[in-house]
Image (cartoon, rainbow, N blue to C red):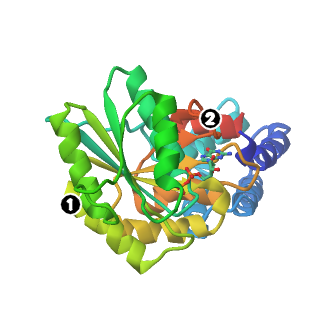
Amino acid sequence: MATFGNLSDRLAETFKNLRTKGKLSAADVDGTVREIRRALLDADVSLDVVKQFTSHVRERALGDEVNKALNPAQQVVQIVNDELVAILGGQQRRLQFAKNPPTVIMLAGLQGAGKTTLAGKLAKHLVKEGHTPMLVASDLQRPNAVNQLQVVGQQAGVPVFAPEPGNGVGDPVKVAKSGVEQARRAQHDVVIIDTAGRLGVDAEMMKQASNIRKATNPDEVLFVIDAMIGQDAVTTAKAFQDGVDFTGVVLSKLDGDARGGAALSVASVTGRPIIFASTGEGLDDFEAFHPDRMASRILD
Ligand code: GDP
């Protein structure tokens, strides 16, 4: 994955140096941990996450499991792998569906994060799995957002509920609420609400998102974060956690070549699972997020 190419290369180099050794001394472990620390920081992984990560790796690498291993270097790689899986959230977390449909999924995140595109991707994915989703256009901030949602809805083959006289022109909370009611009436089993973002965290936007959350009582609130925004990923995620208490994370633009480490820190910093990854502009450039597979890709 391009986003983590540099991190992968750096870790591979570190492990290559380690492989030439037989038994590992404390100095070998310290040197390796230092290199891992630098590689993670250079990839923009947040400092707190790096500290926690390296202290776990160091502790385990100095312990018996490595000391007694036939191949200590390989054992260290395994430990780094385990710890990467842990910061990425451990187990895979699937989308949660409501017992009584429709399942309400609200999307939140900054403008340009990839929410509208994700709405189309998720809808298409759900259709393939036998669901009957409907999209709701509650992003009334960006002039073209409603139209853009209609386009992705058409591509995904799902209906789009847009503001009209009677269901809340100019009022995103009313549109969201009417959209969920409409989905229930028309027996759609999933309703995906696209909401407005701003270029930066903004009190008014957050209030609006929070009001949409209260009005629609979603089963999932997915926070969409652009992996390319670098260091800001963590502070943005914390602001959205305070503002809308999201239930899961979607990492978008993992196909980019920016350092994506900050996005990797989001699960660890917020304690919320990463559920999907977005890897391109097309509706099929989308996958369920598996912490173990992502760790393997990084360590490949
Ligand atoms: P929104 O403002 O959050 O609704 O963001 P959009 O869905 O409009 O996406 C902003 C831009 O990013 C658009 O040009 C999308 O085509 C693009 N985009 C969205 N997701 C991805 C992705 O995973 N990879 C890439 N390369 N571009 C993406």
Residue 82 visible, this angle: no
Q: Say few, some or many: other residues with alpha carbon within 10 Å of mark 1 (under 14 / 14 to 19 / 20 or more).
A: some
Q: Which amino acid type is marked by label 1?
A: Ala
73 versus 219 height, above or below:
above
Residue at 76% of width from left, 49% of height from top?
A: 257
Residue 198 x/y as whole percent: 51, 69
Mark 1–mark 2 Cα distance, whole angstroms, equals: 31 Å
- Secondary structure beneath dot 2 equals loop
- Residue at mark 2: 282
Residue 76 x/y as whole percent: 66, 42
Residue at 70% of width from left, 56% of height from top?
A: 33
290 versus 164 height, above or below:
above
Residue 186 lies left or right of residue 128; in this view the side is left
Front residue (pair 48, 171):
171
- Residue at mark 1: 215
Front residue (pair 190, 247):
190
Q: Which mark is residue 86?
A: none
Single out the residue that lies furthest toward the front: 165
Marks 1 and 2, the one that precedes in the sequence? 1
Front residue (pair 72, 133):
133
Residue 292 visible, this angle: yes
Front residue (pair 88, 274):
274
Residue 210 x/y as whole percent: 30, 67
